[in-house]
Image (cartoon, rainbow, N blue to C red):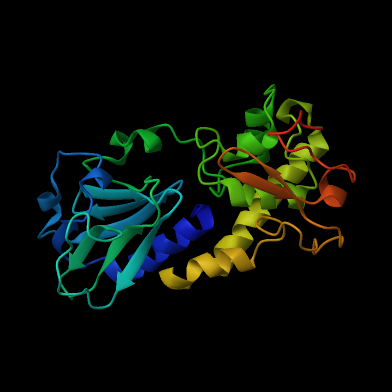
Amino acid sequence: MPELPEVQALVDFLGGRTVGRVVTDVELGSIAVLKTFDPPPDALVGSPIDAVSRHGKFVDLDVDGTHLIFHLARAGWLRWYDVVPATRVRPGKSPIALRLRLDDESGFDLTEAGTKKGLAAYIVREPAEVKGIATLGPDPMADNFSLEDFAAILQGRRTQVKGLLRDQSVLAGVGNAYSDEVLHAAQLSPFALAASLTSEQVAGLYEALRTTLTAAVMAAEGKPAAQLKDAKRAGMNVHGRTGQTCPVCGDVVSEVSFADSSLQYCPTCQTGGKPLADRRMSRLLR
């Protein structure tokens, strides 16, 4: 799933290629992908793209005051074309959910693999009309997001810090992968309770959050959309590296599996050498 660094890279990539261009067509390959009906897709046609921005994991194309917003979810992605294929998208006949054409013949497809569909697109007059945007927490990369702000979020929450970092209503843009990486950098167990963290641990987690995301954004900067997934995987220390060597201490990266996801961590770096029990099998060890 694309998270804040990859989404920011997509925004930068699209901004450099679409701003000033005029939308000539919007084709739907999946009726279900479009979650709004007013304005219709035709409302974008004939108008210029004024800006591309990010709200958490949402990409926002401002098309002369009307916004095309999309969320790539777990298996969605963007395929860019310098010259879009002339063949029109046929609904239900391919992984293409939406195709946008521009006046210089460039454009992009939004695609989604697999059977569990989560890719979503919205055409709205204001970004806040999208519920997922209206309920977002603060952006951890914002210049005005301070340690004091972060500490206030954690204070009194009897919630595991892993889940808190992933909660989009608490922090915008961090998902499963980067929450693993942030916690590894902060040397914290994913199951530590937010309210139990010391002031030093809170400060360390804040620093790890900012530096991990900043490094990932810098690593993704300038890369075309097709290379972002590989760049993300290459930058991971623990996420997706079960059974491999921790680059910090040399221990073996471990995993905890859930019904529809998993997390990875280093026992030596994060849990004092103690393994965390698989939630499906027994109670979690803290």
* Residue 104 screen position, x and y as percent: 18, 76
Q: Is residue 87 visible?
A: yes
Looking at the image, residue 209 sits to the left or right of residue 203; the answer is left
Q: Residue furthest toward the right? A: 273
User: Which residue: 63% across, 39% down?
Assistant: 258
Looking at the image, residue 77 sits to the left or right of residue 179; the answer is left
* Residue 272 screen position, x and y as percent: 90, 43
Q: Is residue 207 visible?
A: no
Would you place residue 77 above or below residue 202 in this image? below
| Residue 47 or residue 239, whichever sits in front | 239
Q: Give residue 21's quadrant in the image.
A: bottom left
Q: Quadrant of the C terminus?
A: top right
* Residue 111 screen position, x and y as percent: 33, 59
Looking at the image, residue 94 sits to the left or right of residue 219; the answer is left
Looking at the image, residue 39 sits to the left or right of residue 187; the answer is left
Would you place residue 36 above or below residue 28 in this image? above
Q: Residue furthest toward the front? A: 281
User: Which residue: 35% across, 48% down?
Assistant: 119
User: Which residue: 84% across, 48% down?
Assistant: 267
User: Which residue: 49% across, 53% down?
Assistant: 1
Q: Give residue 25's quadrant in the image.
A: bottom left
* Residue 278 screen position, x and y as percent: 73, 38
Instruction: Tally the marks.
Output: 0
